[in-house]
Amino acid sequence: MPNDFNQPIIEEFRANHGRVGGWFEGARLVLLTTTGARSGKPHTTPVGYYPDGDGRILVIASAAGAPKHPAWYHNLLANPRATVEDGVFTYEADATVLKGDERDRAFARAVEADSGWADYQAKTSRVIPVVALTQVPAGPPNVNATSMGEYLKVVHDAFRRELALIRKEIAESGTAGGLGTQLRVNCLTVCQGLHNHHTGEDTMLFPMLADRHPELAPVMDRLKQEHEQIAALLADLKKVVSDTEADPPHVLTEVERLTDELEAHLVYEEEQLIPLLDA
């Protein structure tokens, strides 16, 4: 039976490619579909997550500090294979419950990013589990879009949202104690994601369009040059973020530089390519 609280969130998430309003507006959310431990039926639940490097995310079985683990956690213990929807892609993932020091370090990162996790832990006697979800390689991704043009826009908007969220997190973190560990992971993950996206465009999308539309040569040249400029900004950001004594205002400056350059690039690419991709 669908959860009356979760179902509207699930529907809004799917209708808006990962964007939701209300209580979860601006949050990092995925839809996690697990197999019922007793029923064997699929159950979909919106859960918050943290990036943990390319291809892996972390979810926390807090249940808002309830005395019992959430149902989705028990489902993963019984069947660790799950389906993850991130608003752009749907993919299969294997769940691993983190143990010992690895769990403690991951939970500490989450608390550093949001003290509410510590409040949940204080409300319950159970040790709140942290679960890693690792994407299972399975050929081309299952894209949540009906056309190539829509796919391009959805991917771009996902990067826009993530960079906006990172800017907000850095601005709210203050300057005491340097850049938080989870914030560092967030920055490095989006850098890798942009690198992967542009590599895919350079090696597949752009050659395909150039072959079909020779008149696009000036557009392709500009887009490739902009990719090189963005790659340099990504390298600068990674260098700053990788410094263990990184200064949040300095990191924010680099993120804003990247965001401004990237936004101009995305707008131009959308104007030039989406009409062709959807023709």
Image (tube, rainbow, N blue to C red):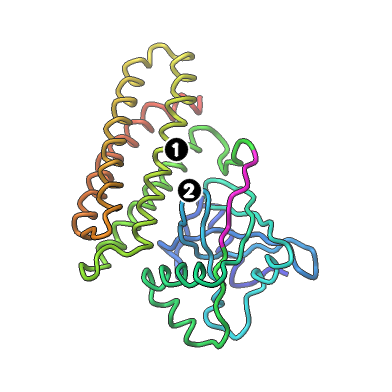
Mark 2–mark 1 distance (CA, rounded to whole Å): 10 Å
* Residue depicted at 29% across the width and 53% down the height: 241
Q: Which residues are magenta?
A: 132-138
Residue under label 1: 196
Q: Position of residue 80 (x, y in %)?
A: 69, 60
Q: Quadrant of residue 113?
A: bottom left
- Circles 2 and 1: CB distance less than 8 Å? yes
Q: Position of residue 171 (x, y in %)?
A: 25, 63
* Numbered tag placed on residue 54 in the rendering: 2
* Residue depicted at 59% across the width and 49% down the height: 135
* Residue depicted at 60% across the width and 86% down the height: 67
Farthest residue, direction front: 101
Q: Residues within 10 Å of mark 2 (few under 14, many from 20)?
A: some
70, 231: nearer the viewer? 231
| On screen, residue 258 above or below 48 | above
Q: Is residue 5 magenta?
A: no
